[in-house]
Amino acid sequence: MILLLLIGMLATEDHATKADQVIVAKSERTLTLLLQGKILRTYKVALGGEHVGAKEQQGDHKTPEGHYILDRRNAKSRFYKSIHVSYPNEQDKKRASQRGVAAGGDIMIHGLPDGFGWLGATHRTLDWTDGCVAVTNPEMDEIWELVPDGTPIDIQP
């Protein structure tokens, strides 16, 4: 009985653990979930097709760089689940406006396109998104559970 109680407590403890920060290191192609500075999980990712440099405008296929918030989620995305990155922030909008272009938007952390879950980890052999951060569908399930809305995300070069 005591063993069952302990197992139940451990399962509840693990389930209640939520990330308080997400870091994407573009050069390493990783997404890391942190809790109070300690690594909870790290995933390999695919990025935007033009992976060098920060997103400058709509349609440039670049993943943004900077400080954002994971502000909402879509369980019925055309990709396997998605969590929205608050790009563009005010600085991004200002830079785009100064250049006379639209900053773009709809940057997400997401799984694979509907019907392509069978690709699994092989999707990471090239950067294929329009600027998003892509993981496998099982990884997206973990991220979905571990990352609450309002979590800060830092996307680094």
Image (cartoon, helix red, strand yellow):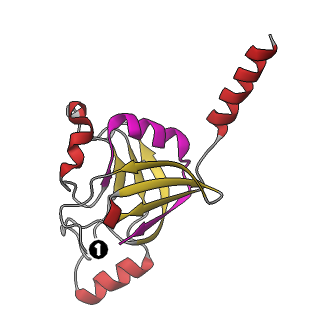
Residue neighbourhood size for the residue with mark 1, other residues' Cα within 10 Å, grouped as few (<14), some (14–19), many (≥20): many
Magenta extent = 133-157
User: Where is residue 78, by image quadrant?
Assistant: top left
Q: Position of residue 40 (x, y in %)?
A: 56, 48
Q: Residue furthest bottom?
A: 98
Q: In this picture, is 84 found above or below 15?
A: below
User: Where is residue 84, by image quadrant?
Assistant: bottom left
Q: Residue at x 33, y 85 (%)?
A: 95
Q: Is residue 83 left or right of residue 130?
A: right
Q: In this picture, is 28 found above or below 3?
A: below
Q: Residue at x 28, y 68 (%)?
A: 104
Q: In this picture, is 138 found above or below 104?
A: above
Q: Position of residue 18 (x, y in %)?
A: 61, 45
Magenta region includes residue 151? yes
Three-letter amino acid code at disc 1? Ala
Kind of element beneath mark 1? loop
Quarter holding the C terminus? Answer: bottom left
Q: Which residue is mark 1?
A: 103
User: Where is residue 90, by image quadrant?
Assistant: bottom left
Q: Position of residue 63 (x, y in %)?
A: 29, 65
Q: Is residue 59 left or right of residue 13?
A: left
Q: Residue at x 33, y 45 (%)?
A: 135
Q: Residue at x 22, y 85 (%)?
A: 100
Q: Residue furthest top?
A: 1
Quarter holding the N terminus? Answer: top right
